[in-house]
Image (spheres, rainbow, N blue to C red):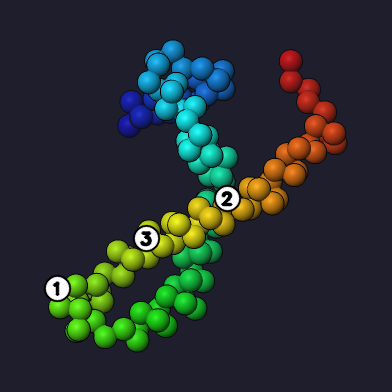
Amino acid sequence: MITFSGLNLYLVIKAYHFRFSIGWINSFMTRKIVVLLGQISYGIYLYHNLVQFYFTKYIFDPIWSKIAFESFGVFSFLEFHSWVVKLPLYSLISFVLAYYSYKILEQPILKRKDRYFKSTAV
């Protein structure tokens, strides 16, 4: 437990200074997909529970209950393991919502923040 806390602290400090001394960590952390995931991570956090609740209640379960799983043969076990479909589907929906939320809501606000809130950092 302490090892993970120390590792997390190290990563936060190094990310704050925008440079990792270990080359492969630096190259990984500066990849476009990793930076994008960092930018939309708050949106993923905000939207994933909403997606899971509303899509399950109003879309997924009504459709899932009408599927004749006995005709699936080997894959009939999916009737009781809907998470196999839900996990990738809801993850994709959450990523897409977070991406567009970042582009439409967060970026315009972030562009204007310096105009209205002056930085006092030294």
Quarter-of-image position of residue 25: top left
Q: From the viewer's perspective, is residue 92 above or below residue 31? A: below
Measuring 14% from the left and 73% from the top, which residue is drawn there?
A: 74
Q: CA distance from mark 3 to mark 2?
A: 18 Å
State the residue position of label 2.
Answer: 99
Q: Are marks 1 and 3 in contact (CB under 8 Å)?
A: no
For the residue pair 5 and 12, the one nearer the viewer reads as 12
Q: Which residue is situated farthest in the left direction here?
A: 74
- Position above or below: 56 against 21: below
**Please, what is the three-letter code of the amino acid marked with disc 2?**
Tyr
Q: Which residue is mark 1?
A: 74
Q: Position of residue 63 (x, y in %)?
A: 40, 81
**Res. 6 in view:** no
Eye-nearest disc, 3 or 2: 2
Q: CA distance from mark 1 to mark 3?
A: 21 Å
Q: In the image, residue 69 lies at what x, y percent?
A: 24, 81
Q: Which residue is more in the foreground, 10 or 23?
A: 23
Mark 3 residue type: Leu
Q: Residue 79: where, in percent of width, then height? A: 26, 76
Sequence-first disc among 1 and 2: 1
For this view, does 47 lie left or right of residue 103?
left
Vertical comparison of 29 with 33: above or below: above
Q: Quadrant of residue 115?
A: top right
Q: Amino acid at mark 1?
A: Val
What residue do we see at 75% from left, 43% from top?
109
User: Which quadrant of the figure contains the C terminus?
Assistant: top right
Q: Which circle's residue, 3 or 2, is located before the other in the chain?
A: 3
- Report the residue marked by disc 3: 87
Q: Secondary structure at mark 2?
A: helix
